[in-house]
Image (cartoon, grey):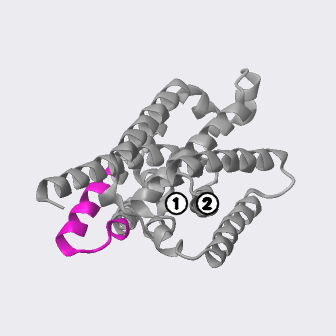
């Protein structure tokens, strides 16, 4: 591979990573405030089963897993709305099922382990042009829906009963955002891998909540920390020859710890 081709792949990977980070971080705020921070882990490990099925039947892994995960996301939200089981129990169930399904398929089929390896740990520097366009489209869709539903979302998150009295269909809103979260988590697998993709949803929004002074600031700070982590993480990866996914998520952890420490220092000064 020539230098120009390699540079093009890195360029595509950085852009795709930024678009996915923006989408995941914004939707992560919604999930975190609904106390569903573990939804990312549940969906990502469910997607593991979808990826294994796609390879087993010779289907396009990205397209099939997006469709598969969309159905899983809807089913998870359906079960949570029934309230027969706690949310963490439902997420643990899908987490376990997806992982077990993938392990069984891998054990029965020779030659799939190496193909799935990149999905476990991510391969952001070999993002295809199609995946770049897809990540850009999902980012625009997520941003548009968030903008159109911002006021409704604010009310549902802070007082769902009042939202219902005002005629807001909170159930439809929840289905919509869980679906978007599922799609974004599948796309983030290419960047961070199955093992770390949930971090894209949880860590930036957790960090933003520590320092943001308003609902809007939470979204903005979450997006900022996510994008910084992707850009700096890829730079560190290229400079020190470490996996991009690990570098990106370690930076997300670093930003969280930094924000936590700054908050503690400010709190002690007030005393």
Q: Which residues are magenta?
A: 227-247
Question: Which secondary structure, mark 1?
Answer: helix
Q: Residue 164 in the image: x percent, y percent? A: 75, 27
Q: Relative to 257, is 61 on the left or the right? A: right
Residue 94 placement (x, y as % from top left) = 71, 61
- The image's mark for residue 38 is 2
- Classify 168 as above or below 222: above
Q: Quadrant location of residue 6? A: bottom left
- The residue shown at (41%, 64%) is 122
Q: Secondary structure at mark 2?
A: loop
Residue 201, relative to residue 257: is it above or below? above
Residue 169 appears in which quarter of the rendering? top right
Apparent side of residue 69 relative to residue 233 in the rendered image (left or right): right
Between the C-alphas of marks 1 and 2, the distance is 8 Å
| Contact flag, marks 1 and 2 (Cβ < 8 Å) | yes
Q: Position of residue 233 (x, y in %)?
A: 28, 63
């Amino acid at each position: 591979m020539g230098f120009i081709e390699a540079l093009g792949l890195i360029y595509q990977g950085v852009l795709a990573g930024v678009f996915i980070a923006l989408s995941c971080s914004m939707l992560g705020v919604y999930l975190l405030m609904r106390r569903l921070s573990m939804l990312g882990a549940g969906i990502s490990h469910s997607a593991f089963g979808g990826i294994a099925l796609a390879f087993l039947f010779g289907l396009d892994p990205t397209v099939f897993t997006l469709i598969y995960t969309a159905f899983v996301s809807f089913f998870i939200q359906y079960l949570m709305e029934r309230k027969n089981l706690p949310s963490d129990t439902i997420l643990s169930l899908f987490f376990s099922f997806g992982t077990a399904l993938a392990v069984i398929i891998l054990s029965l089929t020779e030659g799939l382990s190496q193909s799935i390896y990149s999905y476990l740990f991510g391969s952001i520097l070999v993002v295809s042009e199609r995946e770049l366009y897809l990540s850009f489209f999902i980012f625009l869709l997520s941003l548009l829906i968030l903008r159109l539903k911002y006021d409704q979302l604010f009310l549902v998150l802070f007082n769902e009963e009042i939202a219902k009295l005002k005629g807001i269909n909170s159930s439809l809103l929840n289905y919509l955002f869980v679906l978007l979260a599922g799609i974004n988590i599948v796309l983030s697998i290419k960047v961070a891998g199955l093992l770390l993709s949930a971090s894209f949803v949880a860590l930036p929004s957790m960090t933003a909540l520590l320092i943001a002074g308003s609902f809007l600031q939470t979204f903005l700070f979450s997006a900022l920390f996510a994008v910084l982590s992707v850009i700096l993480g890829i730079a560190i990866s290229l400079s020190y020859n470490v996996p991009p996914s690990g570098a990106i998520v370690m930076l997300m952890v670093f930003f969280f710890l930094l924000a936590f420490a700054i908050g503690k220092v400010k709190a002690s000064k007030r005393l």
